[in-house]
């Protein structure tokens, strides 16, 4: 999958931006604040329908505007597609918005749109995958599986609906004592979708755990042991019945995929607690290369590789080593540096 062009309207700091891309390696240069990161975010948003930087879609809309539009022309080698995503602010509620998507001018459901163009994004901001809350790591897992697995997307949507319904019911039972006769139905739906979600997450991590060994030399240029551990909050109907009184008291569902997490260790020490910032960046990059490999294996073609400010804090040897790895698919790199020693490695340079 390749991206040929991108048009942004009212997206972040870009009132109107039109870009054309080569089918190999593109470098986007510009000073800090010029909107380089926003370009990569927009491409990844078109891949997943979700922003990696904002909890609310409305935050991606330029200030004083009430909508933003993202458009991309893509090419898979067999056919081309025009992708469009529009986010509109609600006129009544803060932080709420609507989102519509189209392929070749035809409206689609979000779960049918996500993954039409696949991409892998590396950004220094994503260090929070390693150091932030479990919700950040769950969002990362979802960003991978949303691009490649329609069954996962549907199960995740249904699970969130069942979770919301069961939480409301648990709260009502706690406050009024009413609704006990309805909880079995919500739990059956919850467990059905949870089983699909957690089976697919386990398959993903089985692959990542094995694949990441191929990138251990990225850490300080020598062999280092990187360990991934998926921590799942498994549920079934019997378990939920046993936990029901505790959850009624809490007024919410305490167990299930929405409480899953994963842990990464470097040489048997927690990356979030003991690794240096440089080591954390290298571990995250290794994880991203594994993600790229998994998407390629799943869909049969390489995703776009989006690298935001990847060369900062790296010496020339590390920069050259990374370029030797990324040359096998369409790659878009941003930098605030001139990078004169690496300019020959890029087929296309865009100056913002």
Image (tube, rainbow, N blue to C red):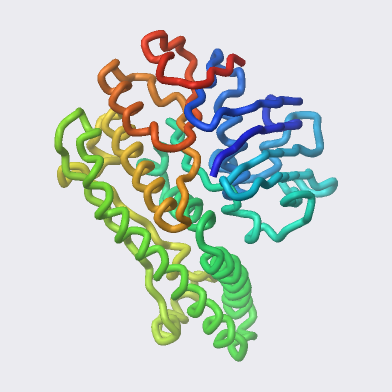
Q: Nearest the camera: 3 or 95?
A: 3
Residue 38: x percent and y percent?
60, 30
* Nearest the eye: 131 or 125: 125
| Residue 219 shown left or right of residue 181 in the figure | left
Q: Nearer the viewer, residue 33 or 221?
A: 221
Displayed quadrant of residue 337 = top left
Determine the residue located farthest toward the right in the rendered image. Answer: 91
Q: Residue at x 71, y 38 (%)?
A: 70
Q: Is residue 187 above or below residue 50?
A: below
Q: Is residue 72 above or below residue 342?
A: below
Q: How many marks?
A: 0
Residue extending furthest toward the bottom? 181
Look at the image and tell me whether residue 98 can be seen. Answer: yes
**In the image: residue 49, left or right of residue 148:** right
Question: Is residue 248 at least partly visible in the picture?
Answer: no
Report which quarter residue 3 is drawn in: top right
Q: Is residue 44 above or below residue 162?
A: above
- Which percent across, then down, holds residue 268? 16, 46
Identify the image quadrant of the C terminus: top right
Location of the N terminus (image quadrant): top right
Q: Nearer the viewer, residue 155 or 135?
A: 155
Q: What's the residue at 75%, 37% (across, down)?
A: 68
Query: Residue 180's x, y, as percent?
Result: 59, 88
219 left or right of 57 in image: left
Residue 263: % across, % down: 30, 52
Residue that appears at 44% across and 70% down: 256
């Amino acid at each position: 999958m390749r991206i040929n062009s991108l048009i942004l309207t009212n997206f972040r700091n870009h009132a109107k931006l039109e870009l054309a891309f080569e089918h190999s390696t593109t470098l986007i240069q510009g000073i800090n604040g010029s909107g380089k990161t926003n370009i990569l975010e927009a491409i990844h948003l078109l891949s997943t329908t979700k922003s990696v930087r904002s909890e609310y879609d409305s935050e991606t809309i330029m200030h004083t505007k009430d909508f933003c539009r993202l458009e991309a022309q893509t090419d898979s080698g067999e056919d081309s597609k025009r992708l469009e995503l529009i986010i509109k602010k609600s006129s009544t509620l803060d932080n709420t918005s609507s989102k519509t998507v189209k392929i070749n001018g035809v409206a689609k459901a979000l779960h049918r749109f996500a993954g039409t163009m696949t991409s892998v994004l590396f950004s220094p901001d994503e260090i929070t995958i390693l150091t932030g809350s479990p919700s950040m790591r769950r969002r990362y897992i979802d960003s991978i599986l949303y691009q490649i697995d329609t069954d996962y997307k549907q199960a995740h949507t249904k699970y969130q609906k069942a979770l919301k319904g069961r939480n409301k019911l648990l709260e009502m039972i706690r406050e009024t004592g009413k609704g006990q006769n309805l909880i079995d139905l919500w739990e059956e739906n919850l467990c059905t979708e949870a089983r699909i979600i957690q089976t697919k997450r386990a398959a993903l991590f089985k692959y990542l755990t094995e694949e990441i060994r191929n990138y251990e030399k990225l850490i300080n240029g020598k062999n280092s042991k990187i360990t991934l551990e998926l921590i799942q909050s498994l549920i079934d109907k019997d378990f939920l019945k046993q936990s029901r009184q505790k959850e009624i008291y809490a007024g919410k569902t305490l167990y299930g995929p929405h409480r899953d997490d994963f842990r990464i260790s470097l040489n048997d020490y927690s990356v979030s607690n003991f690794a240096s910032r440089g080591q954390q960046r290298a571990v995250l990059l290794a994880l991203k290369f594994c993600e790229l490999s998994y998407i390629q294996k799943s869909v049969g073609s390489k995703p776009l590789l989006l690298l935001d400010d990847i060369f900062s804090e790296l010496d020339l040897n590390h920069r050259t080593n990374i370029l030797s790895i990324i040359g096998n698919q369409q790659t878009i790199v941003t930098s605030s540096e001139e990078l004169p020693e690496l300019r020959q490695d890029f087929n296309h340079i865009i100056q913002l």
